[in-house]
Image: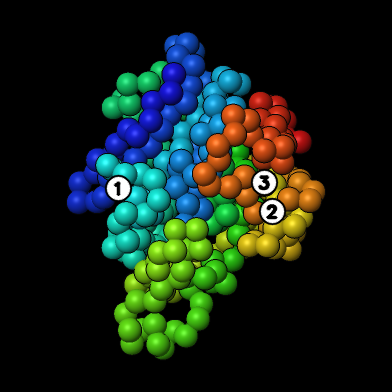
Amino acid sequence: MITKNLVLYRNNQKPIVWDAFFNPTKNPKPLVVFCHGYKGFKDWGSWNLVAEAFKSEDLFFVKFNFSHNGGTVKNPIDFPDLNAFSENNYSKELQDLNDILDYLLSKDNPNASEIDKNNITLIGHSRGGGIVTIFASEDSRITKLITWAGVCDFSERTATIGDLEQWKEDGVKYVLNGRTKQKMPHKYQFYEDFKNNETRLNIELATKGLKIPHIIIHGDLDPSVSFEEAKALHNWNPNSKLITIENTNHVFGSKHPWEEEELPNKLKEVVDKSLMYIKRKESL
C-alpha cells in the first residue's frame, strides 16, 4: 500500500503532509521515518523509489515535509510558500518529527497495528541528519539511527552564518536556490531560535549522548557536507558505524527530477546498507 499526501492537522500549527509505504499484513513491522534536508521535500528526486525499496522489505516507511519547508497541502513539491519557509527553524522541525511520530503510534492512526512500536528507525538526509540525531538523543522510543550525508554542526550551516548585524537590521536574508532560481528567505528569527536553544541544538552533544545503534553513511566526494563531518560524528560516538560510499556526491548520484525507474547505483548502495542494518538484530 502506498498512500501519498496524507495530512496531519494540528491546533495552531501548520499541517504536515506525509506519505506511507507498507504492505498491509496486520503484522507489526519496523517503522522507518525519513527526514529530508535543507531546501528539500519528501518527493525530491528518487525519494519515492527509496520508499518503495523499504516497503519491498516489509518495513513501514514514512516520509514527510517539514511543516515550514515551503511546500503546501495543495502543492507539496518545491516551494510555493516562501513565507512559511522564512518562518522555519530547527525547533519547529524537531516538533514536526515529534508530532508525526506521536500520530503514527497513536490510536488515531488507522494503520497503527501495522507498526512495531518497539522497532523505530530514524533516517535523516543532510540537515535532516542533524535533526534525527538530536531527536534520537532525546526520545527513548527511537531504537536505531541512520544519517545520510548528515551535518555535524548547525552553527556552521548557511542559515546561521554570515553578516549577523546586517541580517538583524534587515530582518531577513536570502539564499538562492540554484535549481528553482528562487531567493529563499530566512527571517532573523531562525538565528534567534538557534541561539536560544544552542545547547539542545548541539549535534556533538547529542551524538555523544546516543545509547542506541547508530550508522553514518556519507559520500567521500560530497561537496555540500564534507566527509570530514561524517568522521567527526563517528569520533563523537565510537560505537557508531561509519560507511563510506565511494566516488559519490551529496545526493548519492540522484537529482531532481529523477525520471529513471531504478535508483542510482550509489543511492541503491546506501539503501541496501541501511536495510541490512535495520533488519539485523545486532549492530553492524
x, y percentage for residue 264?
A: 67, 38
Amino acid type at image mark 1: Thr
On the rendered image, what quadrant is the N terminus found in? top left
Q: Residue at x 29, y 36 (%)?
A: 7
| Residue furthest out toward the right | 246
Disc nearest the viewer among 3 and 1: 3
Residue 256, label in figure: none
Amino acid type at image mark 3: Gly
Amino acid type at image mark 2: Asn
Disc on the earlier residue, 1 or 2: 1
x, y percentage for residue 205?
A: 59, 62
Q: What residue is pinned by disc 1?
A: 72
| Residue furthest out toward the left | 12
Q: What residue is pinned by disc 3?
A: 253
- Residue 185 vertical placement versus 230 (above, below): below
- Residue 137 seen anywhere in this rendered image of the structure: no
Disc on the earlier residue, 3 or 1: 1
Side of 167 where 199 appears, left or right:
right
Q: What residue is pinned by disc 2?
A: 249
Residues marked 2 and 3 touching at CB (< 8 Å): yes
x, y percentage for residue 284?
A: 76, 36
